[in-house]
């Protein structure tokens, strides 16, 4: 069952907004909006290995595909990076890209919440964005023991 | 024998030599209830340990419990996962335990996946990665889970035995040099213990096992070796609950309890005539067995014993295995024995264990905890047969031995223990206890039915009182609204009362129809 609740999407929007503000220019060929997974990758790969992270991201992508058509052109590499954005940025308008990336991030975080719970997911998010204040952020769904 | 030389005989003045202090090995608490006692105080600091056993024994849970109990941001734990349970699933399941503290993740406990270094490279790459991470984090604790899969994968990849031994040697030396207490978690079979370098090099070897017997699972722990600590030998019961692992030392932490050399008082059984038969009552610190068939009044006598104790201000524990506590307390009330008040005042605790796969050691631990809680002086176990039947079949083998240790230690510490046991009456003899439990006891009261003048009556006798003289009389008793009442003086008119079918030897006295000692059904 999808964990990408409206609250999770709001949370993802906040993360993306923060990430966009922090990294306006970057050489990474991924739209800023889709860098949430890239930012989480080293932390999750340490925990579960590249193979584990790739499996998780593939699942998030599969869940997001029915909602966001352009994500079908995106692939996950062996190390868990996203690729295939070159043509997308010329063919899809920025708002749609932003929305698609929100959906993808929401599914990725939703999967984490489903597997390890809200508490540990927030902890991972804090590790990836240590300066981000999470006081006002929540997933909007109780998933505690 | 050589004679000592004169020089040797001469007493030399003692030199005051200051010896350098020996290294003091700090024992780290495990956070696992009962385990520190088994380990002789805890895990020796900086030791290199193996937690081994078959799948499902609780190896990972044990490792988690130890690191969650000890890791801090200053002395963090590095938890290396290899090809075993994926870390994500590990976190998913382990957070269900109460010891899991998510606040510790990240700074105090870090999970690091080594699978790719192992799959894509070799043992040296794995060692280098561990060295890199340990050097950076300077952890107090390191866990490699599962170490066994690492060994398997390298073996299939062609690592020689010498390379493997060298890897383990380097790892052990490195982790000890970096002052880390480490644990390698692995699935091993008992036969693999021989000729396995990892077992030789390790300082500690904790072996977990589970045995399936008659639909029950019995989990056990054995400390096969532990350098620098005096661990308790033998197999110890473990239980995995919401709180994680709990261990039950086979010595039940009782080894340290000293025999109480006090001058022992006589304690009233709560039945005056019975006290007289016992030379004034039961000796404090004795273990007494009340044996007899079903319905003969064993539980009533046990109720007298515990109620008399609480009446005199002695706290007690009532361990009931066959009846529900409410029924027990209500019946006591019907005999005028108020157990509810001491229960409310904390002078009495009733332990009630339904017949489900109990382990003998955990039940005994429960008893010990209750005894400590209320400061009990008297304990009733009603009944030993019910207690044994409530155990998982795999634990029953240990029952007599564990019970012996428990009763010996408790009575040694001054507690007076009354146990009941059901004995089937035969009409040819007087068995005292069919469970060979009489060796557990100092004193035995035997209750039985006898057929007299067309009635099934009840008699009791004191079969044994260690270190004390006692009445040898066989006395009739009844159970009235006052409980057990010993009624008549020793009967001289019958032989063979102990068989249950006595023969009259005295002359039958002409007698009027007398009221039966117990109420009969009305016509």
Image (spheres, coloured by chain):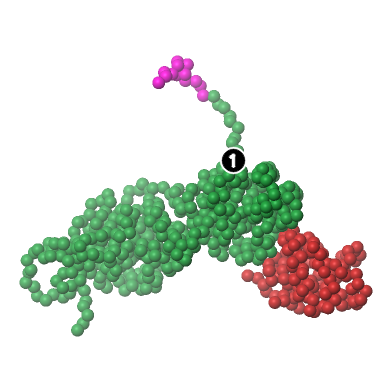
Can you give x and y, in whole percent of width and height, for residue B107 in the image?
Answer: 71, 57
Q: Which chain is red?
A: A
Q: Which segment did they paint magenta?
A: B1-14
Q: How many marks?
A: 1
Q: For residue B13: magenta?
A: yes
Q: Nearer the viewer, residue B494 or A81?
A: A81
Which residue sits at x=24%, y=58%?
Answer: B462
Q: Nearer the viewer, residue B148 or B173?
A: B148
Farthest residue, direction bottom:
B523
Q: Is residue B434 left or right of residue B175?
A: left
The residue carrying pointer 1 sits among few (fewer than 14), some (14 to 19) or many (20 or more) residues within 10 Å by Cα, namely few
Which residue sits at x=73%, y=63%?
Answer: A52
The rendered magenta stretch, by its main secondary structure, is classed as loop
Q: Is residue B40 left or right of residue B427?
A: right
User: Dot 1 falls on which chain?
Assistant: B
In this rendering, is residue B326 above or below B46?
below
The image quadrant of residue B327 is: bottom left
Can residue A94 be seen by looking at this rendering?
yes
Q: Which chain is green?
A: B
Q: Nearer the viewer, residue B505 or A41?
A: A41
Can you give x and y, in whole percent of width and height, for residue A120 in the image?
Answer: 70, 65
Can you give x and y, in whole percent of width and height, for residue B180 in the image?
Answer: 66, 47
SS class of the residue under badge 1?
loop
The image quadrant of residue B341 is: bottom left
Can residue B75 be seen by looking at this rendering?
no
- The residue carrying mark 1 is B24
């Amino acid at each position: 069952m999808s964990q990408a609740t409206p609250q999770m999407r709001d949370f993802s929007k906040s993360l993306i907004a923060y990430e966009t503000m922090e990294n306006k220019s970057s050489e990474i060929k991924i739209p800023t909006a889709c860098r949430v997974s890239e930012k989480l990758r080293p932390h999750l790969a340490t925990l579960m290995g590249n193979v584990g992270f790739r499996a998780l991201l593939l699942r998030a992508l599969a869940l997001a595909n029915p909602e966001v058509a352009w994500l079908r052109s995106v692939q996950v590499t062996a190390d868990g990076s996203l690729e295939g954005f070159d043509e997308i940025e010329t063919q899809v308008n920025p708002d749609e890209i932003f929305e698609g990336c929100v959906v993808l991030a929401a599914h990725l975080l939703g999967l984490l919440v489903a597997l390890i719970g809200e508490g540990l997911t927030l902890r991972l998010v804090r590790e990836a964005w240590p300066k981000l204040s999470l006081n006002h952020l929540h997933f909007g769904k109780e998933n505690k023991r | 024998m050589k004679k000592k030389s004169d020089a040797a005989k001469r007493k030399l003045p003692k030199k005051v030599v200051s010896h350098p202090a020996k290294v003091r090995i700090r024992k780290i608490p495990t956070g696992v209830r009962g385990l520190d006692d088994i380990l002789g105080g805890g895990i020796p600091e900086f030791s290199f340990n193996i937690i081994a056993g078959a799948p499902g024994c609780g190896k990972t849970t044990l490792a988690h419990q130890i690191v969650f109990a000890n890791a801090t941001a200053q002395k963090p734990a590095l938890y290396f996962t290899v090809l075993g349970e994926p870390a994500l699933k590990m976190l998913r399941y382990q957070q269900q335990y109460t010891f899991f503290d998510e606040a510790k993740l990240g700074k105090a406990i870090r999970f690091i996946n080594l699978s790719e270094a192992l799959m894509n490279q070799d043992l040296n790459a794995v060692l280098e990665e561990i060295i890199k991470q340990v050097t950076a984090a300077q952890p107090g604790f390191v866990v490699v889970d599962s170490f066994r899969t690492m060994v398997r994968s390298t073996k299939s990849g062609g690592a020689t035995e010498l390379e493997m031994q060298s890897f383990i040697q380097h790892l052990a030396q490195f982790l000890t040099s970096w002052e880390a207490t480490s644990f390698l978690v692995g699935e091993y079979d008992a036969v693999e213990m021989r000729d396995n370098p990892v077992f030789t090099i390790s300082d500690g070897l904790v072996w977990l096992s589970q045995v399936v017997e008659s639909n029950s699972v019995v989990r056990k722990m054995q400390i096969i070796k532990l350098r620098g600590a005096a661990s308790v030998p033998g197999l110890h019961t473990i239980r995995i609950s919401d709180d994680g692992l709990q261990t039950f030392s086979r010595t039940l932490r009782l080894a340290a309890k000293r025999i109480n050399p006090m001058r022992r008082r006589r304690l009233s059984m709560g039945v005056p005539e019975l006290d007289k038969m016992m030379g004034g009552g039961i000796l404090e610190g004795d273990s007494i067995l009340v044996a007899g068939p079903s319905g003969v009044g064993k539980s009533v006598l046990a109720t007298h014993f515990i109620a008399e104790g609480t009446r005199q201000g002695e706290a007690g524990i009532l361990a009931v295995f066959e009846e529900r506590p409410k029924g027990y307390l209500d019946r006591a009330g019907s005999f005028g024995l108020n157990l509810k008040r001491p229960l409310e005042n904390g002078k009495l605790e009733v332990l009630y264990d339904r017949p489900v796969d109990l382990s003998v050691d955990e039940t005994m631990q429960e008893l010990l905890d209750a005894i400590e809680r209320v400061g009990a002086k008297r304990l009733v176990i009603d009944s030993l047969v019910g207690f044994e039947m409530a155990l998982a079949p795999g634990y029953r083998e240990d029952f007599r031995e564990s019970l012996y240790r428990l009763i010996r230690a408790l009575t040694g510490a001054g507690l007076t223990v009354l146990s009941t046991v059901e004995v089937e009456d035969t009409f040819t003899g007087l068995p005292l206890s069919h469970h060979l439990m009489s060796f557990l006891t100092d004193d035995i009261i035997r209750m039985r039915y006898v057929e007299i003048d067309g009635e099934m009556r009840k008699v009791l006798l004191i079969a044994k009182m260690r270190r004390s003289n006692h009445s040898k009389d066989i006395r009739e008793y009844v159970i009235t609204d006052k409980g057990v009442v010993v009624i008549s003086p020793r009967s001289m008119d019958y032989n063979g009362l102990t068989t249950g079918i006595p023969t009259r030897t005295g002359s039958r006295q002409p007698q009027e129809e007398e009221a039966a000692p117990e109420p009969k059904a009305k016509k």
